[in-house]
Amino acid sequence: MEELSIGEVARRTGLRTSAIRYYESINLLPPPRRVSGQRRYAPETVQTLEFVQTARRIGFSLTEIQSLLEKRQGEVPLGAHWQGLVQHKLIEVQNVINQAQTMQHLLVQGGGCSCTTLEECIDCVLANCQ
């Protein structure tokens, strides 16, 4: 079985070695085998880290990712757990979209304001926002 040094894992994943050690410290990765004090990772570590990076890019927290990785050995099928996380994340994303649309509307309203004082401007923007 080919084992990888931390530098090789970093090269293959594009992560810094400090990030790999951090993920190890928070149990996203199992503790690697040590050879003369140096970490030696199983090849599947690269796949796990690629999954972590993808999940982070689509908005999952490290805690959510850790929960999902722990479920790999669980009795509930991994797909069912993943679907639950996805549904929860979709609700979060929709809330962010709604907030952004509200911000956009307020900015558009404020962009047309010609008030002379801050108080008038705030009242004007809020009145037009209704």
Image: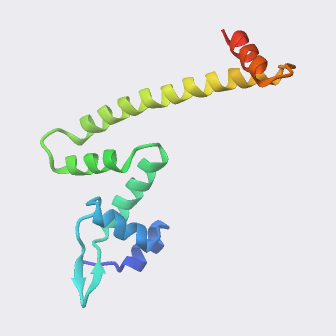
Check the image and report above or below for 114 versus 48.
above
The quarter of the rendered structure image containing the N terminus is bottom left
The quarter of the rendered structure image containing the C terminus is top right
Please give the name of the residue rendered at 40% of the width and 73% of the height, measured from the top-left corner: 9
Relative side of 77 to 117, left or right: left
**Observer-nearest of 22 and 6:** 22
Residue 46 in view:
yes
Give the percent coordinates (x, y) of residue 43. 31, 70
Which quadrant holds residue 64?
A: top left
The way the protein has been coloured in the rendering is rainbow
**Observer-nearest of 12 and 103:** 103
Which quadrant holds residue 28?
A: bottom left
**Observer-nearest of 42 and 88:** 88
Check the image and report above or below for 71 versus 39.
above
Relative side of 120 to 70, left or right: right
Please give the name of the residue rendered at 72% of the width and 20% of the height, measured from the top-left corner: 122
Check the image and report above or below for 59 versus 108.
below
Residue 109 in view:
no
Question: How many numbered discs, if any?
Answer: 0
Give the percent coordinates (x, y) of residue 32. 24, 74
- In the current view of this chain or complex, which residue is farthest to the left? 75
**Observer-nearest of 95 and 15:** 95
Which quadrant holds residue 46?
A: bottom left
Give the percent coordinates (x, y) of residue 119. 74, 20
Please give the name of the residue rendered at 21% of the width and 50% of the height, measured from the top-left corner: 70
Give the percent coordinates (x, y) of residue 30. 23, 65
Please give the name of the residue rendered at 23% of the width and 82% of the height, measured from the top-left corner: 34
